[in-house]
Image (cartoon, grey):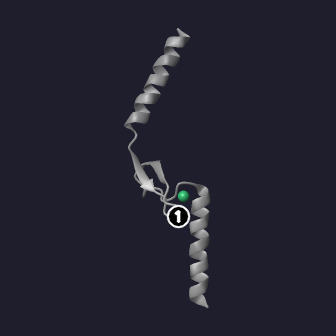
Amino acid sequence: MATEDQEARSAAGRALAALRPTVTGACAVCGAPFETIKAGRRPKRFCSTRCQVRAWRAAKRAEQAKGD
Ligand SMILES: [Zn+2]
């Protein structure tokens, strides 16, 4: 039965999602709270790619200011 199979699969997916350890972090740039999957590596520090880029640019600027 195809529908039962799909049902079982989505149930398994939900169970896996519930098992996945998530951590709530605060964005280092804008301070917005975000959830990230704790996957062994160091957790994400930014809520979005936009904030990541902003932080990268700020670091780059600080580096240049130091050099002058
Ligand atoms: Zn942010």
Q: Percent from the top left, x then y, of residue 42? A: 42, 58
Q: Amino acid at mark 1?
A: Val
36 horizontally vs 53: left or right: left
Q: Percent from the top left, x then y, of residue 15? A: 40, 29
How crowded pointer 1 is (Cα within 10 Å; few <14, some 14-19, many 20+) is rated as some
From the image, tell me which residue sits under label 1.
29
Q: Is mark 1 within 8 Å of ligand 1?
A: yes
Does residue 41 lie above or below 64 as drawn? above
Q: Residue at x 52, y 18 (%)?
A: 6
Does residue 57 lie above or below 45 as drawn? below
Does residue 57 lie above or below 6 as drawn? below
8 horizontally vs 55: left or right: left
Q: Residue at x 49, y 12 (%)?
A: 4
Q: Residue at x 59, y 89 (%)?
A: 67
Q: Image quadrant of residue 20? A: top left
Which one is nearer the viewer's eye here, 40 or 11? 11
Q: Percent from the top left, x then y, of residue 11? A: 44, 23
53 horizontally vs 44: left or right: right
Which one is nearer the viewer's eye here, 5 or 47? 47
Q: Where ligand 1 lies, by image quadrant?
A: bottom right
Residue found at the very far front of the displayed protein: 31
52 horizontally vs 11: left or right: right
Which one is nearer the viewer's eye here, 32 or 13? 32
Q: Secondary structure at mark 1?
A: loop
Q: Residue at x 61, y 91 (%)?
A: 68
- Count of labels shown? 1
